[in-house]
Image: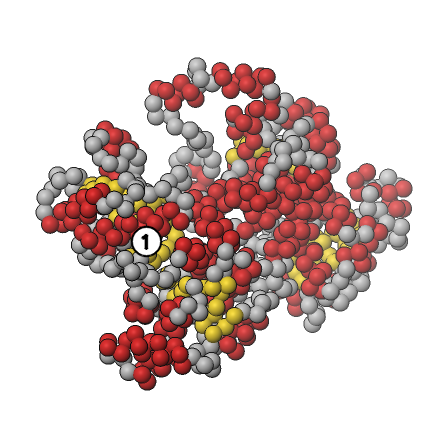
Amino acid sequence: MGLDEDALEYHRIDPPGKLEISTTKPTNTQRDLSLAYSPGVAAPCMEIHEDETDAYTYTAKGNLVGVVSNGSAVLGLGDIGAQASKPVMEGKGVLFKRFADIDVYDVELDETDPDRLIDAVKMMEPTFGGINLEDIKAPECFIIEERLREEMGVPVFHDDQHGTAIISGAALLNAADIAGKDLSDLEIVFSGAGASAIATARFYVSLGCKSENITMCDSSGIITEERAARGDVNEYKREFARDVPEGSLADAMAGADVFVGLSIGGIVDQELVRSMADDPIIFAMANPDPEIGYEDAKEARDDTVIMATGRSDYPNQVNNVLGFPFIFRGALDVRATEINEEMKVAAARALAELAREDVPDAVVKAYGDDPIQYGPDYIIPKPVDPRVLFRVAPAVAEAAMESGAARVEIDLEKYEARLEARLGKSREMMRVVLNKAKSDPKRVALAEGDDEKMIRAAYQLREQGIAEPVLIGDEETIARTAAELGLDFAPTVADPTTGDYESYADRLYQLRKRKGLTRSEADELIRRDTNYFGSVMVEEGDADALLTGLTHHYPSALRPPLQVIGTADDVEYAAGVYLLTFKNRVVFIADATVNQDPDEEVLAEVTKQTAELARRFNIEPRAALLSYSNFGSVDNEGTRKPRRAAGDLRADPAVDFPVDGEMQADTAVVEDILEGTYEFSDLDEPANVLVFPNLESGNIGYKLLQRLGGADAIGPMLVGMDKPVHVLQRGDEVKDIVNLAGVAVVDAQEE
């Protein structure tokens, strides 16, 4: 099937389209329904009647945007009408929800008269927290947006005008930085003089460019004062009329620093590129075919050509999805009355700054695993980068508060935690731990320190103040790799091959000499095996915690810490725990990595250790020991182990959390089963600590929940060790290393 056939099939699969409405409150009982509708709904209605701003408290208005179009200028399709534009507007809703958790009603209005369309949109103000105008042709789009901004009390934003302006503005900030040019000195040529081009030119002036340095060309050539005097251009183009001789696009491009294409494909050739100033900046953003192809522009000259297009198959895609979801997110969260110039500038600067930072592994993987680093081929963040939400939305919210557009003030430090929660429970949970870690950072040894991911993780740990990382590995390799990655930091390095670590070999020998280890073998292990080196470093107190396992199988990475550090004084067994997060629930799964066939003593110990871990995430534990039996319904040795373990835990005066078992998994997590069938259970709420009867079932269970249940997994986290040790999964990403390092720091704080 071709792309068109695939797209048609995608849209017609039942249910047709791309959006649906879902409830956010319980609707299971008669009481739920009486609260949701009659008679309960009368109470919030009367509160809003008394104070209209209470609509933000009692309804979804504060998270609801109307995407409004008449279909008169649909990108790449032209004037196809309101009904035909509906798939595009639904798609816009998908992007709002996917990237910023904003709900959307798409509103297609079969109206071309600007005054009537304005009246229709104004009448919808009680419904929406903001209006996104889309695919409305120029010059009517200018009139419509200007009037609605003046006459409505919610943000109105025409994305076709401002989206490209903001994203390309971010790209321009970085392109000028790389080229070593000041914005105020840039000679800029525009090909195209429609809504997007005029808005972009205006925005570049807001960023610091000079309007007298902007030359705009339409299909008739350079827009000059002479043409304006003849009435040859409309009032919006007249704003950028220059006192220069009339001429063509070729005349305008000669000697220019920047070319901005918002016109039609193929109108620029290599000769025009060669006529530009040194190290030219070319934003060829016509879609689907740019004004000049990426390869042609790059090959046109020998110096640095910084190139951006609107296409995803080339570097530096100017994609509006980097803007509108996050701009509206920030605006909605402070109940802004408008999206003003200060807010748009803040968004562009936040995007530009983000592009200069290290790129997450997940983003690199999404783009084919090729290295992504700030430079000519990476001047704006990728659309799938989750950090965009945390940079742009707060920047917009702050600008709204400072400029007077906000109706409520928010705490920006707490705001980031709220944004984390919108992207999933796992991010919210990790925010709790990372904030604890930042309050008192500890030294974390990274055993595979010359691995690129470990170096990048060390940089982030240092930059974010989560930990003091110690990279174990070859010092020269680490320094060279950090420089190649563009990481401006001097990491703390422990190089086993060059440093004086005789005391480490002595200590390892003392610990293992009656386990068959000779002194020379101890020296070899310290010099050649960073797992043993890191374990002794922590055991000796030269580091507070250890991370390893990135390039090793789990058992081989775990063996050295177990041999050197061992379990805590009152603990006989370590265990591996996963934190699984669902939309509205968090569960801890134990043991999924260490103990193959535990007896009741091990199960009890694992339960206590996992409960302690839960509290580090600010979760009060409720533990269930799982089986295929419910409270004696099956009696054999397998079911007796969790039953006896649960009994031992309930009898232990040191256990201060509810625990019960043996029980089936659904009994443990479904409130109706617990309360209805097994009301005698010590669990009066569903369990959040699930202890599996053996390693096989634990590993199977967590993977099924992750893959089929849609859970996000954090871990495995090692519990029960005498000092903090965590073993990564082979191939973990940098964010996983950072997260486990944060857990390790909190462990060390507890120590």
Direction from residue 370 to residue 656 in the image, left or right: left
Q: Residue 263, position in %: x, y?
A: 70, 49
> Residue 28: horizontal and vertical position, in percent?
34, 25
Name above or below for residue 436 compared with residue 684: below
The residue at 22%/30% (across/down) is: 679
In this rendering, is residue 49 above or below 728? Answer: above
Residue at point 60%, 21% (across, down): 52
Tell me residue 546's x, y (percent): 40, 65
Answer with the quarter of the image where residue 229 lies: top right
Instruction: Say few, some or many: other residues with alpha carbon within 10 Å of mark 1 (under 14 / 14 to 19 / 20 or more).
Output: many
Q: Quadrant of the C terminus?
A: bottom left
In this view, the residue in front, 143 or 602, is 602
Q: Is residue 195 left or right of residue 624?
A: right
Q: Which residue lies at the image location 31% right of the left edge and 83% below the top edge? A: 519
In front here: 687 or 672? Answer: 687
Vertical order, 20 against 4 (above or below)? above
Q: Residue furthest left?
A: 636
Rendering colour mode: secondary structure
Residue at image point 66% right, 35% down: 406
Asked if residue 365 can be seen in this view, the reply is no
- Towards the viewer: 427 or 338: 427
Along the viewing direction, whichever of 438 and 580 lies nearer the viewer:
438
Tag 1 secondary structure? strand
Residue 674 visible at all: yes
Q: Which residue is mark 1?
A: 577
- Which residue appears farthest toward the front when viewing the image? 653
Q: Position of residue 228 (x, y in %)?
A: 86, 43
Q: Tag 1: residue type?
A: Val
Q: Name the side, left or right, on which 440 lies relative to 594.
A: right
